[in-house]
């Protein structure tokens, strides 16, 4: 039947405060959200909105845009207004851009008050403006830009150093009664990163934004992020995630969604259960799985489709799925809800599966399964 959310969640979620990033709740038991960051010049409003639209289509729920110049700050109001998803302005150092982002209606601002304090102490004014506009702040501590004082104290960016930095940053806002905060403590080493978030989770109740920073090209970055987020989320730690890849941001979103689905923290949509193939395979399983995946891309209903290379495990898995094929002797047995509905020649397997999938999806939509 329809895959359901696991009976037992992978972990009790850590109890955290809840903040509101536009319409998306973060923390306090809200579903873990997926975010990404644009790679366009923010001042190029058209290109940025175009990329945000692509991210939205890929399932991104919150988007961050960099704001290093006045031109970028000037673009924020239009981008925030026209974006389909909440926009977070990412600001380093310049308080004037923080005020601009808050005024522009950005859903949140990422800024480290420690940087502001060092150059032009307007932390109090930022706290007041953010409170007046209901704009939460993310404090983003990064191993690469850790305070020199802490680097000297700890020798390198250890979990303790990252956490001390984050809590100190938070205290600069707390002094002014501002607690509408989420925190990240990113490191490129998943082991250090996991240690840092665990420590941080014990020492505060702020919602946490998970990220392995500079995780690398798609393959390595995907694995680093999956391993680190899996370790943390399986302990209930983490309220919103950003996968960082040296790849187009929509890829980050796909990976983030897969991670949440794999952990049972989000209902799966399309799931392809395909065998790795082996010496018994009687069909090109890789090709078949790719073709079925491509043909069913964008399905909004939770559909489990089994693609099996032979009759050993084939019929069993195909029966467990909503839909499946078990191949043998140049033919494919098509299963729907455990019943063989037809046997088709190999060349017709893909189109038959897609046809049947559409029928099931239609039925599911009528039954209100899609959410
Ligand atoms: Fe091999 Fe058949 Fe199992 Fe696929 S289903 S891995 S072909 S035994």
Image (cartoon, rainbow, N blue to C red):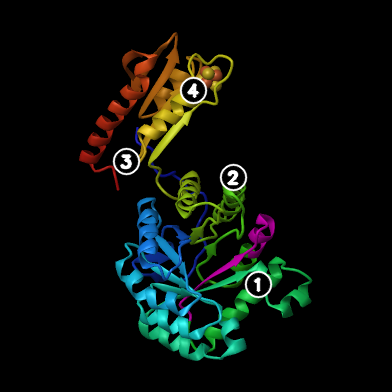
Q: Is residue 102 above or below residue 211?
A: below
- Mark 3 or 2: in front is 2
Classify residue 368 as left or right of residue 306. left
Q: Is residue 94 magenta?
A: no
Tag 4–tag 3 contact (CB < 8 Å): no
The residue that disc 1 covers is 145
Q: Dot 3: few (<14), some (14–19), or many (≥20) neighbours within 10 Å?
A: many
Q: Position of residue 356 (x, y in %)?
A: 29, 26
Q: Residue at x 39, y 70 (%)?
A: 20
Residue 28 makes an appearance in the image: no
Q: Which circle's residue, 1 or 3, is located before the other in the chain? A: 1
| Residue range of the region highlighted in magenta in the rendering | 179-196
Q: Is residue 195 magenta?
A: yes
Q: Position of residue 88 (x, y in %)?
A: 43, 70
Q: CA distance from mark 4 to mark 3?
A: 24 Å
Q: Position of residue 134 (x, y in %)?
A: 37, 79
The residue that disc 3 covers is 301
Tag 1–tag 4 contact (CB < 8 Å): no
Camera-nearest residue between 115 and 302: 115
Q: Is mark 4 within 8 Å of ligand 1?
A: yes
SS label for mark 4: helix
Q: Is residue 270 above or below residue 62?
A: above
Q: Which circle's residue, 3 or 2, is located before the other in the chain? A: 2
Classify residue 238 as left or right of residue 344. right
């Amino acid at each position: 039947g329809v895959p359901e959310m696991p009976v037992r969640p992978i972990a009790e979620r850590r109890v955290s405060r809840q903040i509101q990033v536009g319409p998306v709740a973060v923390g306090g038991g809200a579903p873990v959200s997926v975010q990404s960051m644009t790679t366009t010049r923010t001042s190029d409003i058209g290109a940025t909105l175009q990329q945000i639209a692509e991210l939205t289509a890929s399932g991104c729920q919150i988007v961050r845009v960099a704001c290093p110049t006045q031109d970028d700050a000037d673009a924020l109001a239009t981008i925030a207004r026209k974006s389909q998803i909440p926009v977070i302005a990412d600001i380093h150092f310049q308080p004037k851009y923080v005020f601009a982002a808050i005024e522009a209606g950005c859903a949140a601002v990422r800024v480290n008050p420690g940087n502001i304090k060092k150059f032009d102490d307007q932390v109090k004014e930022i706290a007041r403006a953010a409170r007046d506009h209901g704009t939460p702040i993310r404090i983003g501590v990064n191993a690469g830009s850790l305070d020199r004082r802490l680097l000297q104290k700890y020798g390198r960016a250890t979990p303790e150093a990252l956490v001390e930095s984050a809590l100190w940053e938070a205290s600069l806002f707390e002094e002014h009664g501002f607690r509408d905060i989420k925190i990240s403590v990113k490191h490129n080493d998943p082991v250090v990163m996991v240690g840092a978030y665990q420590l941080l989770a014990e020492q505060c109740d702020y919602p946490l934004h998970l990220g392995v920073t500079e995780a690398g090209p798609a393959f390595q970055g995907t694995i680093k992020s999956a391993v680190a987020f899996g370790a943390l989320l399986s302990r209930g730690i983490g309220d919103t995630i950003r996968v960082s890849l040296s790849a187009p941001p929509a890829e980050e979103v796909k990976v983030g969604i897969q991670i949440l689905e794999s952990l049972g923290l989000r209902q799966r949509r399309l799931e392809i259960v395909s065998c790795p193939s082996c010496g018994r395979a009687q069909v090109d399983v890789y090709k078949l799985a790719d073709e079925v995946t491509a043909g069913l891309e964008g399905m909004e209903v939770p559909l489990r489709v089994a693609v099996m290379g032979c009759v050993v495990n084939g019929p069993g898995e195909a029966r467990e799925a909503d839909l499946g094929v078990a191949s043998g002797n140049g033919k494919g047995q098509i299963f729907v809800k455990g019943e063989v509905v037809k046997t088709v020649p190999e060349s017709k397997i893909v189109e038959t599966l897609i046809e049947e999938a559409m029928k099931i999806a239609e039925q599911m939509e009528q039954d209100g399964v899609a959410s």
